[in-house]
Amino acid sequence: MRVAALWRHPIKGHGAEALNRVRLEGGRTMPWDRHWAVADEGARIKGAGWAACRNFGRGAKSPALMAIGAEWDEEARRMTLRHPDRPDLRFDPDAEGERLIEWARPLYAEGRPGPAALIRAEGQGMTDASMPTVSVHSTASLAALSEAAGRALDPRRFRGNLWVDGAAAFGEDAWIGRRFRVGGAVLEGVEPILRCRATEADPATGRRDADTMGAMRRLRGEAAFGIHARVIHGGEVAMNDPVAA
């Protein structure tokens, strides 16, 4: 088995970024993954720590957001966002959050709460899991789900961090409760990832075009795909690195 893809999502629900390599840290999310999040109007957030996904703008509520691409320049401290229906936006997320709010507002679905503020997740990424995890998926599982859905599914629908080639379809489920090595890091599977309607939207267009939720339930009995994993020992992970489980 080998690493097939690495992704991070610097702003929760607002863009995916492909990576060639990353250094994972023990007990942490992927660096810069969901480091920021866009709070909805009316969000109820206490303090500066983790908060539930219902407080934030995301593809489940506004599918057009799924078509955002992101590029985070850590050295320059600048974020670039791209969308087929919007001009490119380059900004400092810690100092110019209001620019993102105005840029993203037209992408929010009518009748849904609009974007209110860009917040920074202190301590851990604002992932869907309340503990710091990395999400792990297999390309064979994606192929099986694509067949069940009747169309090729872009992996970006699932907003995963780590994709593995060479595992059996849904073989990653067996890693829950077990440790496995990815490149120079050691991870431990924690739990399956329960999915939402964000997966129904095509990341190329931001429009819902596939019954992924129904396909998962028909194939698996529940809308679950991929696993949350905890980083036990940090280390460098790069494209094509070996995966041993």
Image: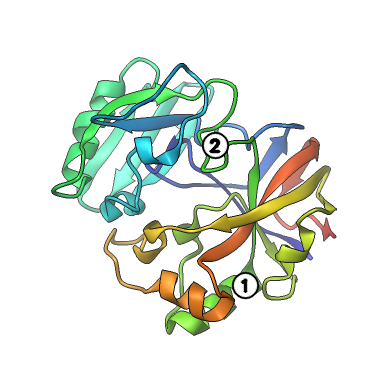
Q: Is residue 27 left or right of residue 16?
A: right
Identify whether 95 is placed above or below 213: above
x then y, percent, for residue 184: 83, 43
- Secondary structure of the residue carrying numbered label 2: loop
Of residues 183 and 174, the one nearer the viewer is 174
Kindly indicate whether the residue at mark 1 contacts the one at mark 2 (C-beta within 8 angstroms). Answer: no
Identify whether 128 is placed above or below 225: above
Task: Kindly identify the residue that appears in the image at 27 percent across and 50 percent down.
Answer: 62
Quarter that holds the N terminus? bottom right
Task: Kindly identify the residue that appears in the image at 79 percent across and 35 percent down.
Answer: 234
Q: Residue furthest left?
A: 110
Mark with earlier residue (2, 1):
2
Q: Residues within 10 Å of mark 2 (few under 14, many from 20)?
A: many
Quarter that holds the C terminus? bottom right
x then y, percent, for residue 243: 81, 58
- The residue type indicated by label 1 comes to Ser
Q: Is residue 43 left or right of residue 232?
A: left
Q: Mark number for residue 33? A: 2
Identify whether 65 is placed above or below 49: below
Q: How is the rendered protein coloured?
A: rainbow
- Secondary structure of the residue carrying numbered label 1: helix
Of residues 206 and 179, the one nearer the viewer is 179
Q: Is residue 207 left or right of residue 135?
A: left
Per the model, the C-alpha gap separating discs 2 and 1 is 23 Å
Task: Kindly identify the residue that appears in the image at 44 percent across and 80 percent down.
Answer: 149
Mark 1 lies on residue: 141
Of residues 19 and 132, the one nearer the viewer is 132
Q: Residues within 10 Å of mark 1 (few under 14, many from 20)?
A: many
